[in-house]
């Protein structure tokens, strides 16, 4: 477990918030906070960098708490997914393209 996850869990425990952190609630939190992050860009390319960082931190916090709750190592699953993505999107076919893998 990372020191960041440990710090999040300590702050959560100090406030007795873990009672609210079911898998479902944490997944909802990820989605809600991702929406708030997206809202930072709603009206165009100009954005408040501090607000974006705050919302990104909220998304990451919920993701890390959910991973911990599920007993999943975030680095391991991201690296596994990256390996799958590399297979689905070979460089020679996907470089510079946003085409979905099944249409390459």
Image: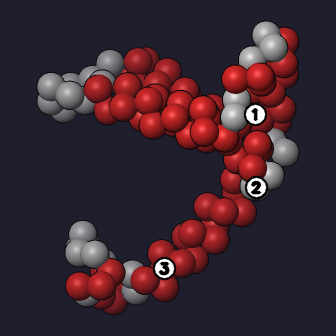
Which element is circle 2 on? loop
Q: Please, is residue 14 above or below residue 46 in the view?
A: above
Left or right: residue 21 versus residue 90 is right
Q: Nearer the viewer, residue 27 or 63?
A: 27
Q: Using the numbered discs, state the Cα–Cα distance from disc 2 to disc 3 in whole angstroms.
A: 20 Å
Q: Looking at the rendering, in which quadrant would you find the N terminus?
A: top right
Q: Nearer the viewer, residue 103 or 97?
A: 103
Q: Residue at x 48, y 79 (%)?
A: 86
The x and y percentages for residue 6 are 83, 32
| Residue that label 1 marks | 4
Estimate how packed mark 3 is, as few (under 14), some (14 to 19) or many (20 or more) residues with alpha carbons within 10 Å: few
Q: Residue at x 15, y 30 (%)?
A: 44
Q: Using the numbered discs, state the Cα–Cα distance from disc 1 to disc 2 in whole angstroms.
A: 13 Å
Mark positioned earlier in the residue sequence (1 or 3): 1
Q: Residue at x 70, y 57 (%)?
A: 75
Which element is circle 1 on? helix
Estimate how packed mark 1 is, as few (under 14), some (14 to 19) or many (20 or more) residues with alpha carbons within 10 Å: few
Q: Is residue 11 visible?
A: no
| Residue that label 2 marks | 73
Left or right: residue 94 versus residue 33 is left
Q: Please, is residue 100 above or below residue 44 in the view?
A: below
Q: Nearer the viewer, residue 48 or 56?
A: 56
The x and y percentages for residue 11 are 78, 17
Mark positioned earlier in the residue sequence (1 or 2): 1
Left or right: residue 87 versus residue 17 is left
Q: Residue at x 69, y 34 (%)?
A: 22
Estimate how packed mark 2 is, as few (under 14), some (14 to 19) or many (20 or more) residues with alpha carbons within 10 Å: few
Q: Looking at the rendering, in which quadrant would you find the C terminus?
A: bottom left
Occupied quadrant, residue 5: top right
């Amino acid at each position: 477990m990372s020191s960041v996850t440990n710090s999040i869990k300590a702050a959560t425990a100090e406030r007795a918030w873990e009672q609210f952190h079911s898998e479902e609630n944490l997944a909802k939190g990820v989605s809600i906070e991702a929406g708030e992050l997206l809202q930072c860009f709603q009206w165009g390319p100009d954005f408040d960098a501090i607000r974006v960082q705050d919302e990104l931190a909220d998304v990451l916090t919920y993701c890390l708490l959910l991973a911990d709750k599920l007993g999943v190592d975030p680095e391991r699953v991201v690296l596994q997914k990256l390996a799958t993505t590399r297979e689905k999107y070979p460089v020679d076919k996907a470089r510079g393209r946003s085409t979905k893998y099944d249409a390459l």
